Amino acid sequence: MAITLLYYKGNNELIKKLSAEDMKKVVQSGEGLLWLDITDSVKADLDILESVFQLHPLTLEDCMTTITRPKIDQFENYMFVVIHAAATTSRAQRVRTIELNICLGKNFVITIHQGPIKGVETALNRTQKNLSTMSKGSDTLLHLIIDSLVDNYLPVLDAMDGKISNIETQVLKNPTQKTLANIFATKKDILYLRRFIGPQRDIVNFLSKENFQFINARTRVYFRDVYDNMIFINDTIDTYRDVVNGALDAYLSTISSRTNDIMKVLTIIATIVMPLTLITGIYGMNFAHMPLLGSEWGFFSVSAFMVILGIGMLIYFRRKEWI
């Protein structure tokens, strides 16, 4: 569990430590701006949030459980937003998402998440270096957090683009079962990410257009810029989905073509061997009188005929462009 507290009192004065009672006085006074970031929260933290910030029990319940879909809930003294950050696992470079719960009030912002989120860390660093963000109000701080979160989708997309490029190279050069596994894994990541991007794009659109109590008209303009980025991300993911589907079709086509080539070669071999097998079968019968059976050159004659027949069939197949 880790808690980061920033309280901008005004006049470029930043306070990083406050007791629960002090936080309650700040919220009740409506002065300054308080940002409380909680990582790996426990029930005791949420009890404090309930007593200090008067959060609704449904909000506290959502903060303790995983919500698979982004959403916005409006309450009397705050607004509750659920969005998701994207990241990649260190080993397999698989896509994963981390839920971020945000409570936005008149003079406070609360961020709650399980595990570190790079976008939140970036926003914390930028805020401490430039206090003008906190001086503009809680809605501006919310924009900074969501904007940083969206920006960190781009490295995930770059990593996914690299994987897709490798898959395309493998499909064209030497497709294997591993290539097929990579295609399905990447396709699964794309569908997983797309499930969050669509609703999240709609939420940012709501923030840029709807008349929410704690978001000023001047800040809604900045959310439109974030919405444009979300559209770009959504379109990029749709493009990746089409490319991966195309790679899968190319893989299946390549494997089918390779199988057809193998079957064609085996069929030609079987066709050539068939009359040769017939000749050897005939001369393998135990009859006393057969052509060339008692001849000194019988074996060599029949063998030469079989060789000429095989070569003749190969020449015929070549002229027909079957091989």
Image: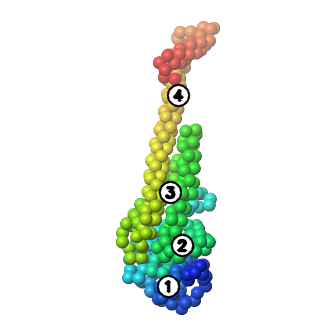
Task: Look at 56% across and 13% down and name the residue there.
Answer: 308
Helix, strand or loop for disc 2: helix
Q: Find residue 189 and name its label.
A: 3
Q: Residue furthest bottom?
A: 21
Task: Look at 62% across and 61% down and name the residue there.
Answer: 90
Observer-side mark, 2 or 3, equals 2
Observer-side mark, 3 or 1, equals 1
Please give the residue where the numbered disc 2 appears in the rendered image. 133
The quadrant the N terminus occupies is: bottom right
Q: Amino acid at mark 3?
A: Asp
Q: Amino acid at mark 2?
A: Thr
Please give the residue where the numbered disc 1 appears in the rendered image. 31
Q: Find residue 265 and name its label.
A: 4
Residue 177 is situated, as x and y percent measured from the top left of the image, at 55, 46
Observer-side mark, 4 or 3, equals 3
Which label's residue is closer to the chain start, 1 or 4?
A: 1
Task: Look at 54% across and 57% down and name the residue there.
Answer: 154
Helix, strand or loop for disc 1: loop
Which label's residue is closer to the chain start, 4 or 2?
A: 2
Tell me how far mark 2 sits from mark 3, CA to CA: 35 Å
Pointer 4 local density, CA inside 10 Å: few below 14, some 14–19, many at least 20: some
Q: Is residue 192 visible?
A: no
